[in-house]
Image (tube, rainbow, N blue to C red):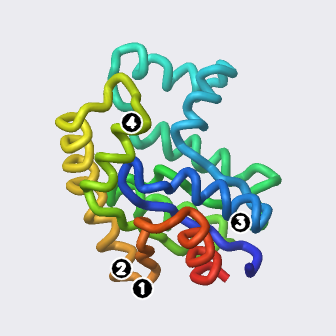
Amino acid sequence: MSTGKGLIFLGPPGSGKGTQAQQLSEAFKIPHISTGEMLREAIAQQTALGQKAQTYVDKGELVPDELLLDLIEDRLNHEDAQQGWILDGFPRNLPQAEFLDQLLHKFNKFSQQAINLDVPDEVIIDRLLLRGRKDDNEQTIRRRLEVYREKTQPVLDYYRQHDRLSCIDGNRQLEEVTTTLKEVVT
């Protein structure tokens, strides 16, 4: 894998992005950066950004883009991210995708490749129901998929228009998906 490669993992909840990002992170020795985990970590460590995020979380609101963007910028400056990284769960909307491009242009260091894990809704619903989280029922899962598609389709279109999108069939055995991803990335 060439140095300085930024990978963006897209795909609906239950598509296997986190699992696959972890596999590639280990294979290529670059960090897997999950915005959800970063937020939880910043809150737990009571960093300035974490304290700001906590006020939104306490109210049950989404953390605003500006705050997420500050977290991402801070994280991409860490030593372990200097040879590349895998972003999981970001960007979720078009303004975030555009900001990320501007940020990376400012750093002048990464080519980005967006990878979309494509999995049929019915398979995702089955996977999420098997995971058995208490807030997962078929109706809420279908709604989450709907919201995901509304918000993320423009992001997919954005990367497709910039010729930086690879769509991978995520409805296969874990090892098969990992093998395909490694081929696409190297």
Q: Give the residue at x 43% y 36%.
A: 131
Precedes in sequence: disc 3 or disc 2: 3
Q: Residue 177 appears at what percent x and percent y?
A: 54, 70
Which amino acid type corresponds to the residue marked 3 in the rendered image? Gly
Disc 3 + disc 1, Cβ < 8 Å = no
CA–CA distance between discs 2 and 1? 5 Å
Q: Give the residue at x 80% y 54%.
A: 80
Q: Residue 64 carries which label?
A: 4
Image height check: is 99 above or below 146? below
Choose mark 4 or mark 2, whichever is in front.
2
Q: What is the secondary structure assignment of the residue under circle 1?
A: loop
Task: State the residue position of label 2.
Answer: 160
Crowd around label 4: few <14 · some 14–19 · many ≥20 (10 Å): few
Quadrant of the image occupied by residue 107: bottom right
Task: State the residue position of label 1.
Answer: 163
Which amino acid type corresponds to the residue marked 2 in the rendered image? Arg
Q: Residue 70 appears at what percent x and percent y?
A: 55, 43
What is the residue that sits farthest to the top in this orientation?
A: 58
Task: State the residue position of label 3.
Answer: 84
CA–CA distance between discs 3 and 2? 21 Å
Could you tell me which quadrant the C terminus lies in? Answer: bottom right
Q: What is the secondary structure assignment of the residue under circle 3?
A: strand
Choose mark 3 or mark 4, whichever is in front.
3
Which amino acid type corresponds to the residue marked 1 in the rendered image? Asp
Q: Is residue 177 visible?
A: yes
Could you tell me which quadrant the N terminus lies in? Answer: bottom right
Crowd around label 2: few <14 · some 14–19 · many ≥20 (10 Å): some
